[in-house]
Amino acid sequence: MSPLWRPSSGCGPACLPGPGEAPAIPVFRQLGRAAGLLGMLGLGIGLAALLPALPTRERQAALRGWARTTARACGVRLEVRGRLPRRRVLLVANHVSWWDVLALLAVAPARLVAKQEVRRWPLIGLLARAAGTVFVDRSRPRGLPATVGRVASALRSGRSVAVFPEGTTWCGGAASCRPPTGFRPAMFQAAIDAGAPVVPLRIGYRCGVTGETTTAPAFVGDETLLRSVRRMLAVRKLTVCVDIAAPLHPGRSADRRALARVAESAVHLVPSASVALTAPVVAGPAPEQPVRAPGRPTATVLPVPTRSPAVTSPAGAAAGSPAGQPEWELPLAA
């Protein structure tokens, strides 16, 4: 199978914390968290039966409430910096853990795009189907255009859609571990076709005891889901951080590959060469005042210059722009 359809990361056991490295809670509290998680999954079965009958707004509220309650039951704190637009958007995020899905639902209960295998997972698959998840069969590459079409239709109908364009999980630490294929551009075409903004999200995990980033929730390599869950439930004061960047507004003739690169850079906040957009991708206004956690700085959001309506080519770049660089190029500097 092509790596485009079976993407992989450079992560392995060395990326995960060893025994005793992550501050842990006593075993009896771990068991309490496990019981809470199982209880919320059981509640999810009833929710799955109820969701199809609910109007969109009530469905979103139910999913958000379920995800946030599940986080509390597992001892996970949610920290959100920035605000989402009120209109429908394509949400794109990095992918560290199975927990990312709950983080997204807690912040923005959108329709998810997931691999076909998730449909058959016990409990989770049932809830995913009820929530209107768009499934991707990676064994049938020819079916991708139809999947992109379903995502575009959902966006046109006013529903937000969330996708992990890396296609696999990685530890979120060293750049060498990042999936070499980067953000796959296919789903960005759905945003272009539907005229929907793209909102990059950065998901990270922090240990509240040390204040440092932790890879404890990462689901990488050949590790089983059960082992990953056990390790995550043991972490003391785990915080999942969701940083919301400014929305990108692609024009109808925008290039999906360039749009994917811009969104990826906004998520990872890494230096890179400038990306020249061959068609308009206009940055929206900066997110509203971020939520400031006590003792923590606000998020740094990668600035995306707004393209002047009069600028249609590098020759028309503003006088204040660097030579040869049009205003709508994104200087990919952190």
Image: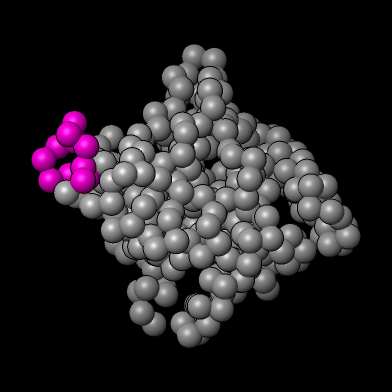
Task: Please give left or right for residue 26 compared with residue 306 in the image.
Answer: right
- 128 or 250, which is in the foreground? 250
Of all residues, the one furthest to the top in this rendering is 295
Task: Please give left or right for residue 89 compared with residue 62 in the image.
Answer: left
Quarter of the picture containing the N terminus is bottom left
Q: Determine whether 56 is above or below 211 in the image.
A: below
Q: Residue at x 57, y 73 (%)?
A: 149
The quadrant where residue 24 appears: top right
User: Magenta segment: does it hold 318?
Assistant: yes
- 206 or 67, which is in the foreground? 67
Q: Residue at x 62, y 59 (%)?
A: 155
Q: Position of residue 156 (x, y in %)?
A: 63, 61
Q: Position of residue 259 (x, y in %)?
A: 37, 56
Q: Determine whether 69 is above or below 292 in the image.
A: below
Magenta stretch, main secondary structure, is loop
User: Can residue 314 be seen here?
Assistant: yes
User: Can residue 239 be seen here?
Assistant: no
- Look at the image and give the residue range highlighted in magenta: 316-326
